[in-house]
Every structure is written in C-alpha cells, then in structure tokens.
Image: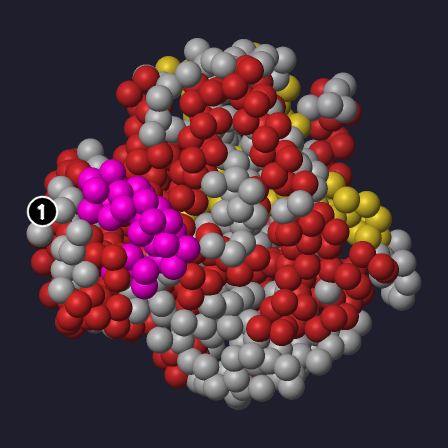
Amino acid sequence: MNGWAGQRLRVDLTTGEITKEPLSFEYRKKWIGGRGFNSEVIYNEVPPSLDPYDPKARVCFGVGPMSGSAAPSTGRVTVTAKSPLTGGFGDANMGGHWGAEVKYAGYDQIIVQGRAKKPVYIWIDDDKVELRDAGHLWGKFPREADQMIKEELGDEDIHIMMIGPAGENMVRFACTFNDVWRAAGRTGTGGVLGSKNLKAIATRGSGTVKVADPKKLMDVCNRLRQAFKNDPMKMGLYEFGSLCLINVANRDGWFPWKNFQGGAHPDANNLSGETHAATVLKHREGCYACPICCGRFTQIKDGKYAGEEFGGPEYEHAVPTGPRVGIIDDANDIWHNCCLTNDYGMDAIECGGTIAAAMEWYQRGLITTKDTGGLELEWGNAEVVATLIEQIGQRKGFGNILAEGADRASDKLGLGDEGHYYTITTRGMTLPGDDPRGLGFGYGLSFSVGTRGGCDHLRSLCCLELSGALYPGLNTRLLGDESACKPVTVNSKPYMVYYEENQKATTDCLNVCCFTTHWSYAVLTPDQVEYLNAVTGLDFTEEDFQEVGERIYNLERAYWNRCMSGSREDTVPERFLKEPMPQGVDYQTNVGVTFPLNDMLSQYYRYRDWDSKSGFPSERKLKQLGLDYVAKDLAPLRSKYVSETEKKKKKYYV
Amino acid sequence: MAVMTKAQAKKFNEMTDKMIDVLNFLKSNKVIDDSEHRSILLKGFSKLVDLLQEKKVINAKDAKAAMNGGFDSLLVSLS
C-alpha cells in the first residue's frame, strides 16, 4: 500500500487487549488521515454526554499518508479527545519525530481507551506492542522520564510521546509531548491520558513509507525546497522562531498586555525573537523533514535562573506567561515560566490566560488574598506567577482551582457574569495571545466558530491577513480581493475564514506543519494535492481535497451541536466587542478599534450552509458531504436547541 | 459578454464580501451550474476566472485583468 500503513492500533488499558484494525480504501479516501481519522473516531465512539475522564473515553493519535515521507514538514501528529477543558470536541497537533516513527512502526493511528489499574506506558516495537509498568516514571518531568525509558529499553534513538505531572494530576489543560519538548498544547488531552494511567507511548519503527511515484515526489519536493529558500516567513521563523512575531504584534496592536487591557507596550522588544537570539538562544531545532527549523533551545545565562535549559519558547509560550500577566521587564522571568509549563506539561496559553483572568479578578476586587491563599496577584509579580504555575501543575492551593481553566475557576469562585467577562475564552478555551482588534477580523471570526473553542495559529489563523501582505497578489488569486490582507477590515473575511478552515483541516489530515503551508505560502493547496497523489498513487483533485476539509469541519461542528452548543456560543469575549483598543505605543496602528463580529458571522454561515437560527449544519450540507448519519443525529436537536436558546444564556463550556 | 447590468455590478461592488453573492447570481442566471458553484467556493477566485474564460464569458485579456484586479475588475468585465 502506498502512503498509508493501512491499519490502526487500538489499545484497551482496562482489558490489556491490543488489536490492529485495517483501514479500508473508502475510509482512507474519505478522511485521508490524522485529524480526519481522529475526528471520525471521536464523533462515533465518544458520546457527547460522556465525561472526558470516563475510562470509555478515547484518545486518538493520528498521522497522515505523507508522514515519514520526504515531503516537507511531515512529522506532525494530531491528538484528539473529548476535551476535559471545554467538554466538547478537542484536539491538538505537535511536531517532532514521533509521528514519523509511528508510521515506520506500521500504523496510521493509535486509539487508547480504558483505564489501567496502575501507571503504565505502551512500548511499540514494530508489530510487537506491550504494556509496561510506569510506576517509577509517575511524577517525573518529561525530560527525566524520556531518558529513563530510553535507558530501560536500551535504545537512544526511539521516540516517545509523554505527559508530565500536570497530565497525571488531570489538570484540565495538560498537554501531550513528544521528543520531550514538542507539545500538542491545547484542549487538555494530557489530562485524559493521565485519567487512563498512561504515562507514555515509546515507539521504534523499522519500516518505510511506500511511495507510488518516487520521482514525481522528489521533483515536487525539490521545487518546494527552492521556493522555501527565499520565502519571507521562512526566513523570519528560522532566524527568530515564532518569537519573530513579538515586534510585529506590538506594532500592529495585538500584543496581549495585561489580559488584553492593552495591545502594545514600549518594552515589548525585551522578549522579541531578536533579543532572544542575541541573549539566550543555545541552538535551533527542526522537526522531521523540516526546511524551516523554527524550534528554539534556550539556556538562561544570568540571574537567579542561570543555567536553566529548555526547548522553546514559542510566541504562544512566552506571551501568555509574560506580558499577558504583566511581566515584561526581565525576560529571564518569562523564560523561566516557559520552562515550568514545559516541565509540568501544561498548555502555556491556557495556563497564562487563566492566571491573567485571576489577576484581573484581583485587580477589580472580585477576589482577594482570602481566595488566593495569601498570594497577591499583582500584575507583573513574577514570583507569584511562577508559584501559581507550580501550584497548578501540582493541583495545590489556589492553583487547584485555576487548574480547572478560566471559566470553570470563575464558576467555582462564584464570580458570576462579571467573572466571565474577564475570562478571555470561547467555548471554554482561552484565546491565544493575539488580539483580533489588531491581528485581524478574520482571525476573530474564526475564534467565534472554532471547532475546538478559542483556537490558535495551528488551527484557525487566517494567515492570508497575517502574512498576505508579504505575498502580493495572493489574496486576489484566492479571494478576489487584495484588500483582505489588511487585518482591520471586514472585506472578504467570511469567505477567507471558510476557505482557510477547510484548507487547514486537510493540512492536518496530511499532518504537514502549517508553517510550510498557508503560513508561508511557498506551498499552496495544488502543491499539496500534487505530493499527496505522488505518494499515494491516487488521483485527488483540489476540489476533492478541500471537500475532505469541509467534511471534517462539519463533523466537528456537529459534535458541538450534539453538546447543545451552536449559534448562541458563536461569539468572542465581550472585551473585544465593547472596549476600543487603547494606545500603548505611539506607532500603534489600531487605536480605537473594536471587533465587528456581527458584520461577518451571518455571511460566514451562508458559506457554510449552516442554519441561521441554530448554527447547525443544514441537512443538505451534511448529505452533500456523505454525512447522512450526522444529519440523522442532529435532526431531533435543531428545534430543541433553538427553543433552549430563547430561554438560556450561552454556555461557557459544556 | 455582459451577464449583469452596470447597476447590478455596482451593487456587488458595494458589498464587503462578494464571493457567495456573485456565485449565486451567476448560478441563478445559468452562467454556472450547481457543481461549478461548489467547486469554485472550494478552490477560490482564480478558478472562477478560469471557468468564465473557459466558457467564453470573458476573454483572455479580461481574465488577466481579473487575476490582477480581483472582483473590482471582473465585475466590470461581466457588466
């Protein structure tokens, strides 16, 4: 079989049963791989009413037909589960080398279900799969546990997926890692693995990926590598990592200062990629087959954290644990916080966002030191932030409440609507550190409808407005409107979001990094179709390819609808709708802007063919996509949701 | 070939987001069919221009202008 391994591995931790299930040709063509396979399993095997921590819940790891091939950046893995943070559909996506190793071991997907009686890890050595004791690994940081497993198995070259202590403690935003530092950050999949007593999946694969037309694949890859050489986004990402965005964010007013109370700060350069590279960058790291190499490895050189080392940071790592909580003077405090979130294994966006919400509750007198165990949550108090990160990871003290995520913590503290005003979330998930009043109205629209809650650059970012200006003519070619590359305009944004969401869903089926597709535009959709066909020997058209993305998007949306989440929840935090952007620096370009969601949302629904009242996909659309069974599932819920909407307020999580 | 009036083109030009309304108009006037409507939505503006040129609704010069000027240019050619 070309491209795919043709089977998935299912491990039941309750019974110890390990099975290999073939994946039919029709199934592979309908869902392609990665996110497609995973979303299909979650929709069909995890009822919306099931507690995410119930042993019957599933966690899926999916790779695509390109994974492990020579095509650029094909090392990513999609991790999917019912989210303990939002209660709805959840997934995340990580780089590294583990994805390719899973493929070499002979699997397109791994499904984990059940709950082990005691901590275990799974050891996959090609065909041989076994459960091994992980009691001695429990409580260890990934950097320690990774080395212990490698020593135990006597192989330094294996690749390991793992959770940290936060996952073991079922922090609702714990993430999964591979190769120690590469995180699938969002939606709390690490906590689901912790609930199953699963510490890690160690993998060794000795197989290969069969390619239908190797010459064609190499021709395409060589062409794309040439295109990457002078790509402007590639150059910024290589030189400065995703921290290259810090100064851009500050200039354009989407830098999340103090929980988005501001959008720019005169000292933002303290944590820029340029400053990081000149002070603490130890070396660069690349994922499997990556022509960009955006990964950083940091060593703090001076101050009280001198000598500390860690993989990272990313923009969405440093910003939430720095400026979002008011830390900006000493970047070493921020690097230290990044190191802590890595070691405990937590989504830095959710962790920093939840602490930022708590700081604003404190600022406005909604909570006091009586609630926080004596901690004074003043903006920029680096010691308190570091303490809270550790408390959250260990589920101790006030951190035990914050470990529930911002919206649930607000409810546990009884803060009512005012508390939720300061949780910068959509569908229960904290938005990343990018203010839609500056980064773009398309980006904000995609937050409101994202199928995993408030999303980020790996899922919903409309790169056509972030980097479209670097590629003159591109917005015209795709949208018919060059003005759409301006962030603060509604022009063509509904169509942009529809197009980009479909495109990113299919990219996640190939498990190709979005930095090499529609972030940098060296690789466009027709190029992806070309290399997919070269590997699989099939004859996907561009339309087939984009339709798979549309199918996945609607399936994930339908999962939320079955959780009774629809049009009422399609919104963004009120701050962005009501509060004009204040001036932070004199060169800021978006002072006074608010986010006009209502000017775009109904038009977006028209592209999606979603019902204007409920926000549910129409029966016609679902049938067009071959999702007749989904149409049947939603039929009894449509009118129920609409009548419920008239009586009840939106759900912050389900 | 004119498939809309100047007034209709002006109305489309005033819209901040045009794609779906232009495609719906072309479909209701039988310039494109259902499956072409769907295909263009999935693939983007350049596919609309290609298809209209293929159908000889616009000529090569208009198509080139549309690829540079987007809907602003295309709507002039269609009206």
Q: Is residue B29 visible?
A: yes
**Label 1: how many residues lie within 10 Å, few (<14), some (14-19) or many (20+)?**
few
Quadrant (top left/top right/bottom left/bottom right) for the N terminus of chain A: top left
Quadrant (top left/top right/bottom left/bottom right) for the C terminus of chain A: bottom left
- Please give the residue where the numbered disc 1 appears in the rendered image: B30
Question: Where's residue A458, x and y in %?
Answer: 51, 49
Question: Where's residue A582, x and y in %?
Answer: 54, 86
Residue interval drawn in magenta:
B46-75
- Residue A444, picture quadrant: bottom left
Question: Where's residue A288, x and y in %?
Answer: 64, 32
Residue at the spot 32% in from the left edge and 60% down from the top edge? B73
> At numbered mark 1, what does the secondary structure look like: helix, strand or loop?
loop
Residue at the spot 43% in from the left edge and 23% down from the top edge? A533
Q: Is residue A596 magenta?
A: no
Question: Where's residue A244, x and y in %?
Answer: 68, 59
Considering the whole magenta stretch, tell me its main secondary structure: helix
Q: Is residue B60 left or right of residue A294?
A: left
Q: Amino acid at mark 1?
A: Lys
